[in-house]
Amino acid sequence: MRAKKHITSDAKSSSKPHRAGRPRSAESHNAILAAALKLLNERGYRSVTIEGIASEAAVGKQTIYRWWRSKAEVILEAFTRYTADRIAVPDSGNVQTDLEIFLAQAFDSLTRDSGEVVRGLMSEALIDPDFAEAMRDIFISSRRSVLRDILLKGIERGELASDVDIELIIDLVYGPMWYRLLNKHAPLNPRFAKQISEMIAGKLTRSD
């Protein structure tokens, strides 16, 4: 991951439920998440280890394992906090424009610095059902929520039909994104963002 150098440890907190154990030290908690992000930036997802995170954060491995089950869970929380405010929610007054801006931002982030991390987390989710549930609840749901809000505003403004299946549309938008991210057969670029937004808006435009 090539994350920006302005990463800090005071990012927005995640709502992730943690394992039972001694009360969490806020200082150690933030140090661990900051260490995970630093190592992601320097080494990439596959090269980050619990041992490395513990050393960088100046805590023992058992401190990490009291609160997270695996490297993937630490990185999921750290990454979710880091990305929380990086993609702005557009509100141009036009649903097609908002879709295009949102997707262009997401594609830029995945192409520039976060694609490897997301691929690593998705791979982990394929083999660990508990982690897959956590990823859906924490990361995937937040991204779907933003897109849902964009579409609902389009309905409120009368641009989209009121009876559209919003959850299906969200799947149709994100499906191509993940497919290109995983297979790397075609780029995630502004042109692709424009094509998707035009297709969705064109098919769902309200007809009077």
Image (cartoon, rainbow, N blue to C red):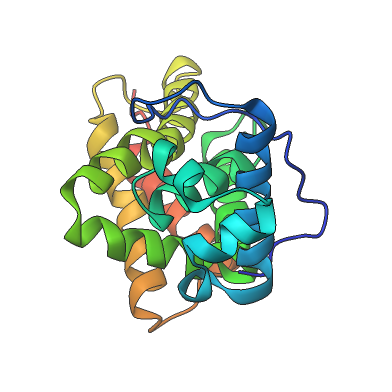
Left or right of residue 28, residue 107 in this image: left
Residue drawn 54% across the image and 25% down it: 24
**Image quadrant in which you'd find residue 179:** bottom left
Q: Residue at x 61, y 46 (%)?
A: 32
- Left or right, 144 with respect to 41, comes to left
| Residue 87 place in picture, x, y as percent | 64, 43
Q: Nearer the viewer, residue 118 or 158?
A: 118
Residue 196 on image: x %, y %: 43, 57
Residue at 62% across, 63% down: 108
Percent x, y of residue 107: 55, 61
**Which picture quadrant has residue 22?**
top left
Q: Residue furthest bottom?
A: 185
Residue lying at the far right of the rendered structure: 6
Relative to 206, say whether 6 is above or below: below
Give the residue drawn at x 52%, y 59%.
193
Q: Identify whether 159 is placed above or below 140.
A: above
Residue 72 is left or right of residue 146, and the answer is: left
**Count of numbered tags:** 0
User: Farthest residue toward the top?
Assistant: 156
The reply, left or right, for residue 11 in relation to residue 194 is right
Image quarter where the N terminus lies is bottom right
Question: Could you say where residue 111 lies in the image, as x and y percent from the top left?
Answer: 58, 70
For the C terminus, which image quadrant? top left
Residue 85 visible, this angle: no
The reply to whether residue 79 is in sight is yes
Viewer-closest of 21 and 49: 21
Depth order, front residue of 18/127: 18
